[in-house]
Amino acid sequence: MQKYLKQVEAVCPNHLERSKVLVNSFLSGPGPKLQHHLLERRQKMVNWATEWWLDDMYFSIPLPLPININPGLALRPKKFSNQQEAAIFLARFLMELLNYQETLDRKELEVEYVKTRDGKRMQPLCMAQHYQILRLYRKPGEVRDEHIVLDRTTSGDHIIVAHYNQFYSIPVRASDRGRITEMEMIQQLLKIMETPADPRTPPVGILTTSSRPIWARARQELLKNEQNRHNLELLERCLCIVCIDEDVLPVTFNESYKKNDCWINDRDYANVLHHCLHGGGSRYHGANRWFDKTLNVILGKDGMWGMVYEHSTGEALAISNAFETLTDNVDAMQPLEENLVPSHLPSPEKLEWKLSDRSLNDIREAIASFDSLVEDLDLCVLWFDDYSKEFIKACKISPDAYIQLALQLTYFRLHGHLVATYESASIRRFAAGRVDVIRAASPETLAWVKAMCQGDPELQNDTQEEGTKRGQQIKEFFDLAVQRQTNEIADNINGYGIDNHLIGLRYAAKEMGEGMPELFNDEAFQIVHHFSLSTSQVTTKNDAIIGYGPVVPDGYGCCYNVRKNAIIFSISAFHSDGRTSARKFAQTVESSLRDMAEMLKNAQSTR
């Protein structure tokens, strides 16, 4: 509760006195009984928090999956001289994915370790989410979504390929012969890639972009037909979705900060991230996906290589690390020297749909709502290369804490106040642990950003001595903010964050049926949980563009990838808000990082 009050003090200080009264009332009233309920729940479950966290974070949220929930990731593009080379690359990736699946089936994945908080020993991390990536499917519900746990005896032995909005099923294993060969996989993919577009193909995949209750009702309509039931079962039980996109997105989707920032040909970083996140809407590849499936890998006509993934199944590092490792394995392979030999396998199964008038109307409505969402997304990518983590480490500061403070300074400069800030903190030190929330807004941070932003015109007449004194004071505020943020990171990854605990107390109140405590209905509580700044560090082995949309209409999404020679920021906002701008945020992040480096260099020079 004391940590909660610190959040109120940082983001809505005018509510602090009332919040103190409500906290005292909670501690002397329903709080202890709810806490006791959590302690009892802990004795009965492997992890008392995860089920409620999943419901609160994902299953009870009715928003569409693309942009709002599912992140996108693009690795360095591939270079193919013809369609056959593209099919070879894709086939090899899928064979590596089958190898990975079989490693998971045998439970042979290498356990990951981290240092304990005191740094004296190594502690294993829970590997559960790695094992469930290929075994869970997110099923839409009218009230709440749920996970379908796929039984490996009846699922995962086929892939679905999406091409020109048409879905095809390719069996990759058979009971009488095991896996198909790499050569056979290449042939199957080429058959699909050589099939021209059919304008009569209904864009059924667009239904997965609808809000969850609407998609749940549309799915029930599809299930009335036996052929549709068969198709849905194939889509839900496949190993993954392979999306082959034959067009590139136009330059209207370009919005990287520096004009010469190109990822491939004339497509800048933001254009490629748009492609991964939503495919460009119904006019391009938005229906060439099945967003409920955990893994949608995407190969573009120009060699663009990426994915979009359903987030409730696992965290970015578990999914992106696997994707990147499998890609690296393929890139290390020698060119194929054999000639393609005709395959005797039957052609891939084309999924044909029987659509009622109601289903056709559902598709039309999904197209309209999804295209509106796509047009509203404001993306900007900043490749900051003035300095990177080595400079920050040389200053004896955690790079993550440093970047989080830069984001706080950026938001304050743009909007004049701090807001509730979400940064995911892995709690895999605990069995079945997912994440808690590292909160970067704090009283210490507020004091520092105010000092950094004090009106420059009034300081123009400062003497050198006064300027030096002011610089020292700002550095002192910064040191306190860094220390507080460093402790916040350590607290969260070691299980002492507040957000899972607060979720638990709220859900305990629901479960006990004694009414919701006033504290949880208070305006300050809503403000503290309105994450106008949603951030995440996803560090990859190679250069990668990763991003997602804001989690609230008036917010920003900010994913950052700390590389050896640069920090890649992917920033998102919604045009419809009017007060937020991804481009302005990117420009201000760059200024904030430069000013912070100058602050540190000045502090060193005055010692």
Image: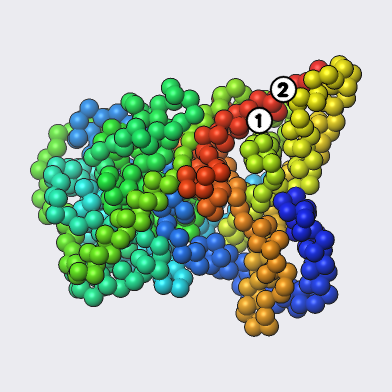
Report the residue at 39% width, 41% height from top: 274
164 horizontally vs 555: left or right: left
Residues 225 and 326: in front is 225
Per the image, label 2 sits on a secondary structure element best described as helix
Look at label 2 and name its amino acid: Glu
Is the N terminus in the top left, top right, bottom left or bottom right quadrant?
bottom right
Look at label 1 and name its amino acid: Ser
607 horizontally vs 157: left or right: right
Cα–Cα span, label 1 and label 2 = 10 Å
Residue 524 in view (yes/no): yes
Q: Earlier in the sequence, mark 1 or mark 2?
A: 1
Residue 248 lies in what quarter of the image? Answer: top left
Is the C terminus in the top left, top right, bottom left or bottom right quadrant?
top right
- Residue of label 2: 598
Residue 592 numbered mark, or none: 1
Residues 367 and 23: in front is 367
